[in-house]
Amino acid sequence: MPPRSKKDDNTAPSTQGISNPSSPLLRATEAVAKVLGNDWMVPLNAESATQSNPHIASGSITLDYLLGGKPNTFGVRMCPGIPKGRITQVYGHESCGKTTLALTLAASVCKQGGNVLYVDYENAISPGYAAALGVPIGDRSRFLLAQPNTLEEGFQIIYAMASAGVTLIIIDSIGAAVPKDVAETPLEEMGKAPRVGLLAQKWSNFLPQIRARLVKTQSTMFAIAQIRDAINTQGYGDSTTVQGGRAWKFYPDLRMKLARIQQETIRQYNAVTHQVEEQKGSGKVKVTIEKCKVSDAQGKEGIFYIRYGAGIDDLRSFLEIAIAHGVIKKGGAGWYVWNRPDGSELKVQGLDKLASEIQKVGAVPELEAAVKNFLYGVKVELPVEADSEDEEGNDLMEGLTL
């Protein structure tokens, strides 16, 4: 839901849909409105929405479809993408696509004219891979990489960027940050003072502050977390836990779990052996919406694909959806036939060759349109960007307490 505008303070509340005019709730509302105006009231009616809530395209048609939720009576999906002005957390085991999704999201934001701060607590970002995914790594007005020395230093950077209205803030990763108390502990003192829960405590103090700031400026925070083995379970409860502490279960409006469920091979030339060999070329990733407060997507699951070295493979998703709906016919011996709307026929053996041929003839937009017709039934357009109010003053960290 977009932030409330102070311009509507004196607007009289609507009486539409009121079943009991003498309700004490309404009498109290009138009394409060005389003092505070009506800005604090938020109308709730998903069925009357004529456009989606502000969001960022994730770069995966599967993920955007899942997050959109069930369409209302106007055919509008509430949030077909990563919600703006909110906190999103994505977690999973290593090499399941978390950083790829984050960089794809960053490229999507920059392509639409936005700007991105990437807080790299792990000091492990690959500039070449980021550039290959479309991130403008050489333009600091659109993409800025930060590698803070401590957790608190990162907090200051994040808070200032959110106050300035930076479009997207990515944190990679939650558990890799080192609190200042730990970073400044002499080596000979390491292990003597108990530090259990210190990182979680710091995040628990910071998240309510940054959440309020994000809502005000409509900056979006996208945080990555790893899954780790839990300690002291003694055979009871979950054997794994997510980094960052329990606060990360409460403050995000969207939490997603990624899991790599399959690796696919391609035939590729290997200069070492001077032979064409079977190589791992792509991964099949399952996404589960663990928590969603922006649509009815909670609990839903879907599959998307990552091509190693190239990022999220949306063309593969287009192909799988088209095959499922019979747009592309699958025959014996791996043959695929696509009867295009212009009457021409595309017949290729092998899914990878089909993808290459579709790219070669420039038919990707045509296939995408056919797929979206099955998913949405209507033309999908991005919502118009709302003008945001400028922050007063130059102290972008005012109000932050560490």
Image (cartoon, rainbow, N blue to C red):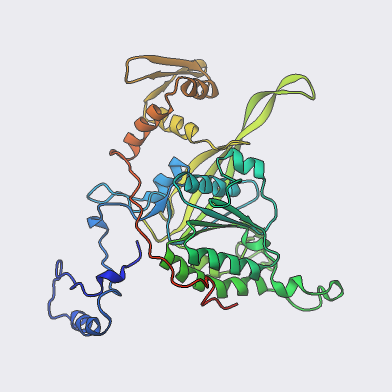
Q: Is residue 152 above or below residue 101?
A: below
Question: Which quarter of the figure has residue 4?
Answer: bottom left
* Depth check, front residue: 193 or 139: 139
Q: What percent of the width, then of the height, locates residue 300?
A: 43, 50
- Camera-nearest residue between 102 and 283: 102
Q: In the image, 335: left or right of 97? A: left
Q: Quadrant of the N terminus?
A: bottom left
> Residue 97 location, x and y as percent?
59, 46
Name the side, left or right, on which 42 lies relative to 399. left
Front-most of residues 222 and 162: 162
Q: Residue at x 39, y 32 (%)?
A: 368
Answer above or below: position of 356 versus 318.
above
Q: Which residue occupies 61% across, 43% down?
A: 130
Picture mark count = 0
Q: Is residue 119 left or right of residue 348?
A: right
Residue at the spot 83% in from the left edge and 74% down from the top edge:
186
Above or below, 114 against 252 in this view is above
Report the quarter where the C terminus lies: bottom right
Residue 276 higher or lower than 163, as above or below: above
Q: Where in the figure is residue 390, as x and y percent of width and height?
A: 41, 65
Name the side, left or right, on which 148 lies relative to 329.
right
Residue 262 in the image: x percent, y percent?
Answer: 59, 38
